[in-house]
Amino acid sequence: MGFIGGVLVSNLVGLAWLSTLIFTIASIFIRTPIFLRRRLFAALALPVVFVAGGLIYDIALTPEEHAALETKQIAERRAKHEELVMKRANKRSASEALRLSKAVYTTDSTGSALIISSDITNIGQKTYKDIVLTCTVFAETGTKLGQLHKTLYKRIEPGQKITVRNLNIGYTDSDWQKVICDVLYAATDA
């Protein structure tokens, strides 16, 4: 359609909208039935869409501007992708660098809350904080009963070992027979 066609369409639609506006205002002063007024008001909204569509043709980009915009969008997508890759790598590195050992699982006096005591060792090269533990609970038959998450708000340096005693992970089915806990995620300390 091109720039000239876009301007022409924009002006024609603008004139149609203006005439509808004039009829709508006139219908307020002339005793017009309410249902007709509502239809005129609704008719005002439709040309607004066409005017906006026509204005898109009025704002045409030059090839240089289009190339610059495309380059900027590609750079933004790459930055988001790299950020996502870093988050995934951090999740993977935290779960590989932080090890649980000597884990003992018990329940509270009611038998419904899972209590864990364990050592967490950082065998990686980074300092981690806000360690998210995940525990999967299984029945005697091997059926997965649920998964519990608990954030441990502590900092652990490379080569350091911290001991967690009587940490309440959360409420679970009292029929559990087996528990597997691991580090799900930890934030790197900047």
Image (cartoon, grey):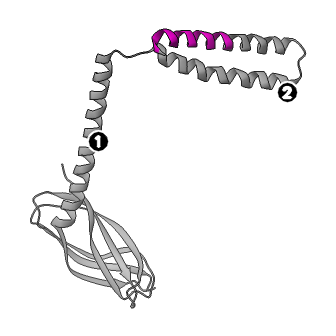
Q: Residue extending furthest front?
A: 1
Look at the image and tell me whether residue 155 can be seen: no
The image shows a total of numbered marks equal to 2
Residue 101 seen in the current view: yes
Main secondary structure type of the part rendered in magenta: helix
Q: Is residue 24 above or below residue 142?
A: above
Tell me where residue 92 appears, x and y as whole percent.
22, 61
Asked whether 9 falls inside the magenta stretch, the response is yes
Which residue lies at the image location 40% right of the left edge and 87% below the top edge? Answer: 139
Local crowd size for mark 1, using a 10 Å CA cut-off: few (<14), some (14–19), many (≥20): few
Q: Amino acid at mark 1?
A: Lys
Q: Is 89 displayed left or right of 39 in the figure? A: left
Q: Position of residue 179 (x, y in %)?
A: 32, 82
- Which region is colored magenta? 2-16
Image x and y of residue 2, in percent: 46, 14
Q: Is residue 86 above or below residue 103?
A: above
Q: Nearer the viewer, residue 35 or 13?
A: 13
